[in-house]
Image (tube, rainbow, N blue to C red):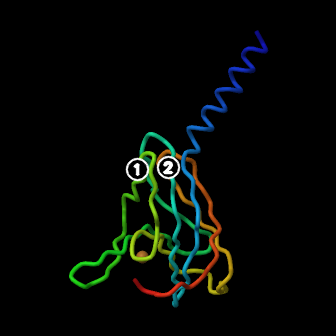
Amino acid sequence: MKRLSFFLIFFSLIASGNANAHIEVSNSWARLIPNGMGALFLEIQNSHSEPDILIKASSPNAKSVMIHKTERKNNITSMRHLMKGINIPANGNISLKPGSYHIMLSGLDKSLELGDKIEVTLEFNKNKSITVQPVLKIKPPIYN
Ligand SMILES: [Cu+2]
């Protein structure tokens, strides 16, 4: 009986671990923009049959971290703050890339230089938080 309950606990731990780890983040990199600004780009893959939401992000290297989307309307480019985060479709993926979704960093540590790594933690509605360590780069064009 003791052995059986041990296995039950063991398997329920595996099951909850799987349900909690359906989000994968890859190809993260960050752009350093003058005046202590930066933007983080990455890809999010959801292998679950239910959608999830990237609800917020935070960084020990920046004073403010916001989820943004760059939009172009009537030849004017602007950035929108996505208060409700970004939906990640079931069994799908979302790209945070220049000209689209990104994570806006402001008030970055003044000592940071190109090639340095920063740390950003992403929080999801269902999945556990994921921390990435993107390298600071500049990829032209700077504003798009
Ligand atoms: Cu932005």
Residue 69: give its label: none
In the image as oriented, which residue stretches furthest toward the left? 74
Q: Which residue is mark 1?
A: 89
Q: Is mark 1 within 8 Å of ligand 1?
A: no
Residue at (36%, 65%) from the top-left corner?
A: 82
- Who comes first in sequence, dot 2 or dot 1? 2
Q: Which residue is mark 2?
A: 46
The residue positioned farthest toward the top in the image shown: 1
Q: Quadrant of the C terminus?
A: bottom left
Inter-mark Cα distance, 2 to 1 = 7 Å
Q: Residue furthest bottom?
A: 34
* Image x and y of residue 10, in percent: 71, 27
- Out of 52 and 140, give the one closest to the viewer: 140
What is the tally of numbered marks visible in this picture? 2
For this view, does 109 lie left or right of residue 54?
A: right
Identify the element where label 2 is drawn.
Answer: strand
Identify which residue, 144 or 126, lies in the foreground.
144
Amino acid type, residue under disc 1 in the picture: Pro
Percent across and percent down for residue 77 are 31, 82
Contact between marks 2 and 1 (CB within 8 A): the answer is yes
Amino acid at the residue labelled 2: Asn
Residue drawn where x is 66% and y is 86% of the image: 113
